[in-house]
Image (spheres, coloured by chain):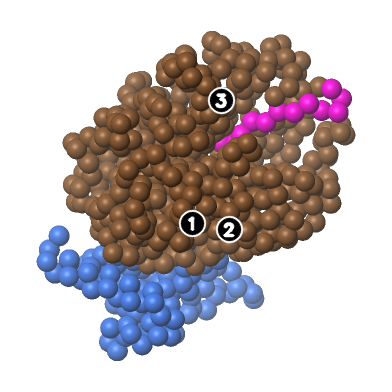
Chain colours: A blue, B brown
């Protein structure tokens, strides 16, 4: 692990620990990168289903931020580090799932687009997925979403011991 | 246990389909807004077909599924004095009127925002009921509590880490070994403040000795799993407490695994038996621990009389009976960033929660257990409340032998030896039931419900249920004079999470590494719960 990566990891840890002490509102104020945080989620409108009344497809708009981050190796790498540091790995492991569902298969309960995945991380889901809104800056949510999306691409799980 | 029953078992007398809920387990992954585990059902056994009398759905917060480490499970309800007691995944203890199915009281004890759930079966004792929390993988601070059966009021609550006043250690505390003597060891045996997220939950079984008025329960693993982050003995985790039922005051403690490095929770059952030990009558406590040793303790004072291996062990070299300390194998001690291979037993232990059964007739202990080893890598982890606090990549695999991952054995307590053993393809994750008729029952994860001869282990009868079995057999004598035996079929739990949660076997680290050892389970069973009741001929 490079020094840079390690430093990133530790700063995230410190952030996480301090964040736990305050309410969500305080956390947002303390968020070190909140000033630089990318556009909020409000620029994307995501649907979870392909059905809409009137025989139409649901209205949705993809986020420009999502499109920018998706597929960018540096952003994906940052998302991978966050996936470990934010303990996503403790529920989803390296994609196979555990407490949370697998992420490396092709089943997406709440949609497969990066906008869907970011919304799931940001808002949480009813059966146990916590909401990271206010805990993580939006840019980091997009980075994790970008990494999660790569897990289902059929690649072997990273860090897996043989 | 009533009845002589060496004859053939009659046919199925009653069944109840429970949707996806099995053996106290419910697989709800990917089902939005579905109620989390578990509904309580009452069946009228006096009527043909045992019709439903009432159901009680405690409707726990569905989000609690997100902090339940090892599938969404409940280990059972208990009856006493006209009430049924059970715990909810979101941290409540509930008392229900056994006749009407109406709630009598409900007490909030655990907080899912701190990662606390409750999965254990309560133990009624005298006028109290004993419960404890789960969450050793979530950085909880473990505790046990006694509630008043009539009102649900908390009479006492004792933590398993932290200062003595919280642990209820006072002048009555007389541990047998020196390492447990001293002030606030639940603080000083940890790096600064780590005891606050140190695990040590109470999700297994509680035993009660009415003569001594003592309750006994095991304490889970310390958190995080990554042991490099928490040097010290990490008291009072991975051990056993004896407490005064009425006050909760600790009487003695013994630590099965000081500074646990392998997730060897100390929560397995404590079987209370009076026996002759080297010519002397002893009030004993027998405990098959996850670390692979069968302990015999003097339950009056916590002295270890014997600790004999009952499964292959590489993680340790034995127990020093003079000091009571487990002797670690330094070659297998985990290190951060380095993969240590072939650690036996694996994290679920030589035996997990699945309770054994003692036969007063044969004098043997019947033990369902595992044959699993693991490769383990410790990785960095930080505590974030309400998320997993583990810091370990694990891959489990079959232990020595032909690939079998489970065993069912008869153990001679007095001579510390195996009398017979049956290999099973998968971990034997069901409880055992020994009857006075010299028949022992257990279930397999393929779904076979088996009856074997108590003295030889010979298979007498088997029945294929609709799903893998992780439930506990039970037996009773009906009002018609016949003996019944029941089993809840329905795969799940940590070992069955690959099926219950539709996990992806390409990632061997999934479900804390259990998926790696269970890749063939989806080939032989599907999820779904069914209760089966048989009559014995």
Comparing A67 with B68, the one in front is B68
- Name which of mark 1 and mark 3 comes first in the sequence: 1
User: Which numbered tag is attached to residue B168?
Assistant: 1
- Name which of mark 3 and mark 2 comes first in the sequence: 2
Circles 2 and 1 on the same subunit: yes
Magenta region includes residue B474: yes
- Picture coordinates of residue B353 (x, y %)? 50, 38
Segment tinted magenta in the rendering: B467-481
Return the residue at label 2.
B156
Q: Are marks 2 and 1 in contact (CB under 8 Å)?
A: yes
Return the residue at label 3.
B274
Q: Residue at x 75, y 26 (%)?
A: B484
Name the quadrant containing residue A87.
bottom left
Q: Secondary structure at mark 3?
A: strand
Q: Secondary structure at mark 1?
A: loop
Residue A25 vertical position relative to residue B384 in the rendered view, above or below: below
User: Which numbered tag is attached to residue B207?
Assistant: none
Residue A62 showing in the rendered view: no
Comparing B274 with A75, the one in front is B274
Q: Secondary structure at mark 2?
A: strand
Q: Read off the chain for label 1.
A: B
- Secondary structure character of the magenta stretch overall: loop
Residue B10 vertical position relative to residue B283 in the rendered view, above or below: above
Q: Read off the chain for label 2.
A: B
Q: Residue at x 41, y 34 (%)?
A: B303
């Amino acid at each position: 692990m490079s020094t840079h990566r390690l430093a990133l990891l530790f700063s995230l840890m410190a952030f996480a620990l301090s964040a736990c002490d305050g309410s969500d509102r305080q956390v947002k104020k303390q968020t070190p990168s909140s000033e630089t945080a990318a556009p909020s989620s409000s620029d994307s409108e995501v649907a979870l289903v392909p059905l809409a009344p009137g025989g139409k497809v649901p209205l949705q708009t993809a986020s420009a931020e999502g499109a920018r981050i998706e597929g960018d190796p540096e952003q994906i790498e940052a998302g991978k580090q966050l996936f470990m540091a934010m303990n996503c790995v403790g529920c989803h492991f390296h994609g196979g799932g555990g407490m949370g569902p697998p992420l490396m298969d092709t089943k997406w309960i709440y949609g497969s687009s990066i906008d869907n995945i970011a919304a799931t991380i940001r808002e949480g889901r009813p059966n146990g997925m916590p909401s990271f809104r206010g805990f993580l800056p939006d840019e980091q949510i997009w980075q994790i979403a970008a990494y999660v999306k790569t897990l289902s691409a059929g690649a072997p799980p990273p860090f897996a011991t043989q | 246990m009533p009845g002589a029953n060496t004859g053939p078992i009659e046919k199925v007398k009653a069944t109840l389909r429970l949707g996806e809920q099995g053996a106290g387990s419910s697989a709800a992954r990917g089902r939005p807004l579905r109620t989390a585990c578990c509904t309580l059902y009452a069946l009228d056994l006096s009527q043909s077909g045992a019709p439903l009398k009432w159901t009680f759905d405690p409707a726990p917060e569905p989000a609690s599924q997100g902090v339940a480490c090892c599938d969404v499970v409940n280990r059972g309800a208990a009856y006493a004095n006209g009430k049924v007691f059970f715990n909810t995944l979101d941290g409540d203890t509930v008392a229900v009127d056994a006749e009407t199915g109406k709630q009598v009281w409900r007490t909030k004890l655990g907080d899912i925002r701190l990662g606390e759930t409750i999965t254990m079966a309560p133990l009624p004792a005298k006028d109290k009921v004993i419960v404890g929390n789960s969450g050793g993988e979530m950085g909880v601070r473990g505790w046990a509590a006694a509630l008043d059966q009539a009102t649900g009021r908390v009479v006492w609550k004792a933590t398993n880490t932290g200062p003595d006043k919280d642990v209820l250690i006072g002048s009555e505390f007389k541990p047998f070994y020196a390492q447990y003597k001293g002030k606030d060891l639940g603080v000083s045996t940890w790096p600064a403040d780590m005891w606050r997220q140190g695990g040590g939950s109470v999700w297994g079984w509680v035993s009660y000795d009415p003569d001594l008025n003592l309750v006994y329960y095991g304490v889970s693993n310390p958190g995080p799993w990554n042991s490099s982050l928490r040097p010290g003995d990490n008291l009072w985790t991975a051990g056993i407490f004896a407490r005064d039922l009425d006050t909760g005051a600790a009487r003695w403690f013994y630590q099965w695994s000081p500074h646990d490095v392998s997730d060897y929770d100390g929560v397995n059952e404590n079987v209370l038996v009076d026996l002759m030990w080297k010519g002397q009558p002893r009030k004993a406590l027998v405990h098959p621990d996850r670390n692979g040793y069968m302990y015999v303790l003097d339950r009056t004072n916590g002295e270890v009389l014997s600790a004999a291996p009952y499964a292959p062990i590489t993680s340790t070299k034995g127990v020093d009976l003079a000091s009571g300390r487990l002797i670690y194998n330094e070659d297998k001690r985990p290190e951060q960033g380095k993969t240590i291979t072939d650690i036996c037993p694996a994290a679920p232990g030589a035996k997990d929660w699945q309770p054994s059964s003692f036969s007063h007739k044969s004098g043997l202990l019947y033990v369902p257990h595992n044959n699993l080893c693991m490769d383990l890598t410790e990785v960095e982890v930080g505590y974030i409340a309400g998320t997993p606090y583990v810091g370990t990549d694990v891959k489990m695999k079959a232990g020595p032998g032909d690939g079998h991952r489970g065993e069912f054995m008869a153990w001679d307590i007095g001579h510390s030896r195996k009398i017979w053993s049956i290999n099973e393809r998968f971990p034997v994750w069901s409880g055992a039931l020994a009857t006075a008729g010299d028949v022992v029952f257990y279930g397999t994860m393929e779904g076979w419900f088996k009856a074997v001869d108590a003295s030889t282990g010979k298979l007498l009868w088997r029945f294929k249920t609709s799903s893998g079995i992780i439930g506990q057999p039970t037996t009773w004598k009906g009002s018609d004079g016949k003996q019944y035996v029941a089993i809840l079929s329905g795969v799940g739990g940590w070992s069955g999470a690959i099926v219950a949660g539709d996990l992806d076997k390409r990632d061997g680290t999934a479900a804390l590494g259990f998926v790696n050892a269970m890749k063939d389970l989806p080939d032989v069973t599907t999820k779904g719960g069914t209760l089966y009741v048989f009559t014995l001929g």
